[in-house]
Amino acid sequence: MLRIEVIFHNATMKKTTIALTLSTFITLSQAAQALELIVVNNYDAASSEAIWKETKTDQVPQALLSNENVARPTSPYSALFPKAFMQESLFAVCFQDCNQEDGFRLQDGEIHGRDLAKWDVVEQSNVYFWLNSYFNFLESKLNYRPSKFLKVMTNRELRDETAGKIMKNNAFFNPGDVSLSFLPASKNLLFKLMGGKINRSGFDPSVIVHEASHYLFHHLFPNSVNSEIGGLNEGFADYMANIFLNNPKVGLVMLHGKVLRNSSTEVDASGRLKTYAPNMEVHDLGERISLALWKTRQLANDKHELDRLVLDAIIDMRANPYSSIHDFKQKMLERIPTVVESRHLSGVKTIWETIFSGSTNRIQNTNFLESGDKAKTIIGFKTKQEIPEELARQYGIKAVEESNYVILHQEQVAANQQASLVGTESNSVLKSYWIVHDTSRNNIMGIYNENKELISDEQELAKVKGLADNVRNLDASVKEFSEKLKAFTELSKGKGDFSIAYKVKGTETFEYNARINGNILAGQKIEVKIKRKAIVGRILGLPEITGITLYTAPVKLAGVPEINGQSVIGYKLIMKTGTAVEVILDKIAL
């Protein structure tokens, strides 16, 4: 069990330089196993506008800082990350990169006083302190201890895959390498001119707990298929921050006293009532979840027991990886009567039925499994995404991702339910799957293998989920593909909407062996060198594209542009960072 011994001190900070201000908190601990840290505390006080008036971007008001004595790390400089001091058996908190030295010095087992006063060290200490406190809370109050080691990086310099610029003003959990990243805050002139003030994400206790709760959710329900569960993940993360800090507001420190999301209000920032609608953005859907949970908690007799039941409900969803948000609603309604008095039950049920009206949709029949003999080519694509090795390592993903799929048959199962027979080739082996999706809510309802068995294995689901996503959004994907072909073809001629932000620097045409329905045709490959116009491109936030390749074939296809008398059947985008995305149409019903 992780144990933390915290001694709270009251201290008054004088208005002086940051080094002198923070040093007023520093007194070397006399306890042999104690470590003194300066952390961002008093989260409730962050909502006061007065304390932020003289606070600069990327800093924290004196009123929110305190020095805390905690037990020293149990695994400093261990074999896993030998350069990281703030390391426990469950996690390590590193400055920027766990492969480099800490950004502070140690003196008699304590962080050197002058180093302790640096904002970089305050952030790293803050993340370590709150993660330690949160994991202790999970174990002592909710009887849960995560098992996967968590790598945490503060003020991390992570470049985006399109423009190569350092990403800012964010924090995220990456399940690919089980890591948390807290990114730096924006200090650019344009941001300041627009009145923006923002702190590093690692300064905010609510953001720290929110991101750590994504890590927790990954333990509870690692094999989910539907994007709606991404909304549950977001709502759960907000709720866990709410209950840990006993405050329904998230983001108060990061946004200089302003609220990012508030689980106690029935209306969101855009003025909409917090009720469910299909295809919601995950954070919007998450606000509905955290609202229902927070309102329920206010009426619960044993609040920590309700919290345990929330974890239990999510774990229970593992049995059905195709679960939707309404499955979670149903599981909560089954559990709520054990922690809410009967006189409040009708009110709690009304909350859930109002926010999430309706019930879970199930596959009406499986007759489609017997109609494979009707298979014929409808449409098929080859896709490839390449990311430089360094970026791939940073994001914890593969450097090259390829897919080759064809939709062979589609059948209406019931109202708002459609089944698609999809073929895909991997390592020269052709496999087919039946994918059923809810067309009204855009949920994947089931994926069946060639033996007509519903796939539930986590590893197999991970392989075919991307395929299912392509099919689920087929109409939108085909429309987007056609629009990009048109826009890129126009840009190659110096025309169209993209010409406002990009300039053509040169074009070359080569012979290309196009493949349509297995037939090799004499096509063309047009390579276009592109440069983003500095001012317009930056203002619009468009990626830095350095090249576009267009692929053509001597066939007549409706709805796609032509170059040199041939139909454009695909494109490849090349970014300044070396990231490349390629999509080519290679199967079509002619």
Image (cartoon, helix red, strand yellow):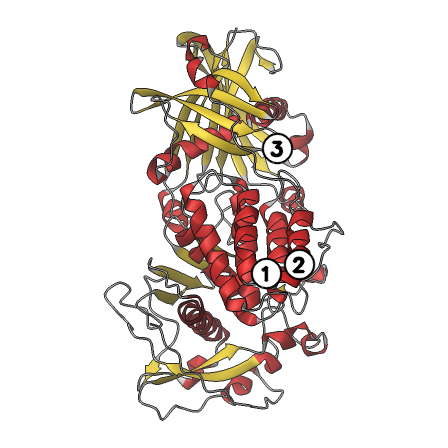
Q: Label 1 sits on what residue type?
A: Ser
- Residue drawn at x 65%, y 32% is 498
Find the distance from the CA under tag 3 to the CA under tag 1.
28 Å
Tell me whether the residue at label 3 lies in contact with that at label 1, contact meaning CB atoms closer than 8 angstroms.
no
Label whose residue precedes the other's in the sequence (1 or 2): 1
Q: Amino acid at mark 3?
A: Lys
Depth check, mark 3 against mark 1: the one in front is: 1
For the point 66% across and 58% down, which residue is it?
Answer: 191
Expressed as whole percent of the image width and height from the top left, the position of residue 404 reads 41, 23
Vertical relation: 538 (above or below) 366: below
**Which of the pair 550/319 is nearer the observer?**
319
Residue located farthest toward the bottom when viewing the structure as drawn = 30
Q: Nearer the viewer, residue 227 or 466?
A: 227
Residue 169 seen in render: no
Residue at the image point whose x is 55% and y is 67% from the top: 243
The disc label shown at residue 191, or none: 2
Circles 1, 2 touching at the beta carbon (< 8 Å): yes
Per the image, label 1 sits on a secondary structure element best described as loop
Q: Is residue 39 above or below residue 383?
A: below
Give the label, 3 or 2, closer to the camera.
2
Q: Can you tell which mark lies on residue 503?
A: 3
Question: Is 387 left or right of 348, judged from the image as shown?
Answer: left
Indicate the position of residue 231 as horizontal and vertical percent values: 56, 48
Q: Which residue is mark 1?
A: 186
Image spot of residue 2 (x, y percent):
35, 73
Picture quarter with the N terminus: bottom left
What's the distance in space between the residues labelled 1 and 2, CA to CA? 7 Å
- 196 with respect to 369 (left or right): right
Disc 2 residue type (three-letter): Phe
